[in-house]
Image: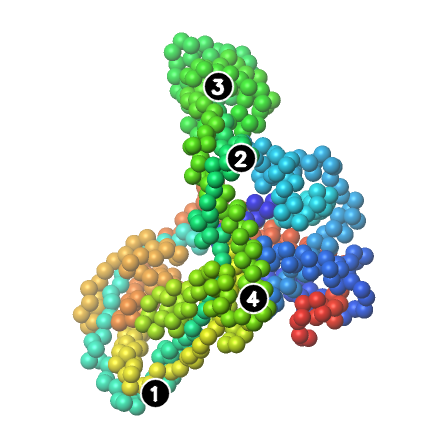
Amino acid sequence: MLDKLRDSAKSWVAKVLLGLLAASFVVWGVADVFTFRPGSALATVGDQEISAQNFTDSYRNWLQNYQRQVGQTITPEQARLLGLDRIFLNGMIRDAALDGEADKMKLAISDQQIADIIQTNRAFHNSQGQFDPTLFREVLRQNGLSEAGYVAGERQRFLRGALADTVEWNFTPPNTLKEAVYRHRNEERDARYFVLRPAEQDVPSPSEQDLKTYWEKNSARYTAPEYRVIAVLKADPQDIAPKIQISDADLAAAYDKFKRDYFKPETRAILQIPFPNVDEAKKAKERIAAGTDFMALAKERGLTDADASLGEVSKDKIFDTIIADAAFGLAQDQVSDPVQGKLSVVLLKVTKINPEKQSTLDEVKNELTSRLQLEKAKGEVQNTYDAVEDARAQQKSFDDIAKEVKLDLVVTPPVDPQGLGKDGKEVNVPFKEGVLKQAFESDTGVENDALTTPSSGYVWYEVREVTPSAVKPFDTVKAQVESDWKAQKLREVALEKAKQLVERAQNGIAFETLAGEAKAEIKKVEGLKRNETTNEFGPEAVAALFSVPENGFAFAPEGDGKGAKIMQSQAVLIPTFDPNSEEAKTITKALTDGAGSNLAASYVADVQNELDVYVDENMWRQVTGANAN
């Protein structure tokens, strides 16, 4: 289900749904839920309680994982300002509500089903794609989970999904809605147009006062950014790893330990043709033996190349073990006898065999060396972190700390929030994005917490100098102000003249006459769609054209701001809706997923309303450090 959600989150519909989901938090109780109720629990959902300790531990783990995923450091204060803590608590409340509903409906899942779900999780598969119990326990250990706790969590996740997903999957959009979306997407228009370009002499010369007034009203455009000088220390495994020496003995021991990681099982390129029964398969085998090509026979039976191919796979990747045994028992280019699999009868042909291979130590020496270097570097980074923090506790300067722990101290020249110096060029800032974001929210004389990098490293920084932002003096930017003023006036003149021309066209003046007055050539464009642009027709022009009926007139600014496009909409093509087309199917899926998700959100909200949800606001402030609303 999580994979499904991740894939769906990449679509345009999902982006709309995220907005709906955010709005639904209001329904779920972001405002109403957070009310005071005496008691020891942070939140109660029906007869279930969410303790302060449970929330704190879960939220901390989630925030750490989130930072690793986005590759960006987020402090607790920033997370609080973004409302992530409240959103996370609402998620816990949602889960508790679904748990309560599942209990009420007496939903259950067997231990064997849970075991099957866990064994199919790729996070617990070894390099051969098989479930590895040792790896399973190691992953749980690294994430601070017990086996019992993880199994219980998977059981809850499955049951919650059984409720929410059922609501989502049952939605079917009406044909009227599908057809409306299809037509909106595919409506096409032709147009005649010409471009009006006023001459610069049509714009009067500005007075000194005109320029000063423009400069004052648009001061942000002429404001120099704030600059800061930042000192940075960075200890990252990726930087330290190449300097670490790995002995031959360590390599040999590591090779023995990780040998299976460098083993590639035998793979085969396999073709198959399914048949309804053994007799038909035998007749087909006889034809192949008499000279009929295997793939020609497959195409006779309506199969494409992709349909007939299993790809190049290892034996364990074939679901049907009977077919797997048969395929891996054939010689290359040999066609099998009819094979009665679990689901169908098939003929098999192996077209390529890649033998299994165990890479030698010499073959993987470089890769294995890098692997060991990185492992050892992580340990050294942790030691460096402890040493730096001890030195900071003793109030030692960054300069002295850098010498003690043998780290490079980088002191930047004045740099703006985008990482540019006063000359407009990029400034070298270690862990740039994280350091700049935090440094511009800190100040001189402040001891800042270390930042963590995506590769489990650490970065320390301090602000040494601040140059406040300021509006550049008028005299230093006068030329730029005059250029900007003229550009704006030229755009205003173009749009005003274009508006007048469109009004005259609507009053019956011939389009050719108007183009002649503007000394412009009439051009044509065909087959424009509402959500498509061309070099000649940008978003504003397309939107203006689709805002008028057939034979209507419209205008829009040119992309360079120096003119305006005057348009007449001509032929309008509204395509016939084909419910069986691929696009119609895509639209159906998008609408189903979108509306289904919204229904699921409404269902969860209704469940929560029935259960009575309360949050102890006083305890919330104690747990998160938030101020009262």
Classify mark 1: residues with Cα within 10 Å, few (<14), some (14-19) or many (20+). few
Disc on res. 213: 1
Q: Nearer the viewer, mark 2 or mark 3?
A: 2
Disc on res. 348: 3
Marks 2 and 4, Cα distance to the nearest angstrom?
37 Å
Marks 1 and 3, Cα distance to the nearest angstrom?
82 Å
Marks 4 and 3, Cα distance to the nearest angstrom?
69 Å
Q: Amino acid at mark 1?
A: Thr
Question: Does 252 sit above or below residue 584?
Answer: above
Residue drawn at (52%, 47%) of the image: 376
Question: Does 608 sit above or below residue 505?
Answer: above
- Tell me: 100 left or right of 375: right
Residue drawn at (69%, 36%) of the image: 115
Q: Amino acid at mark 3?
A: Leu
**Quadrant of image for the N terminus:** top right
Q: Quick check: can you spot residue 324?
A: yes
Residue drawn at (56%, 61%) of the image: 387
- In terms of depth relative to the viewer, which is nearer, 253 or 53? 253
Element type where label 3 sits in the image = strand
Element type where label 1 sits in the image = helix
Q: Amino acid at mark 4?
A: Ala
Quarter location, residue 200: bottom left
Residue at label 2?
253
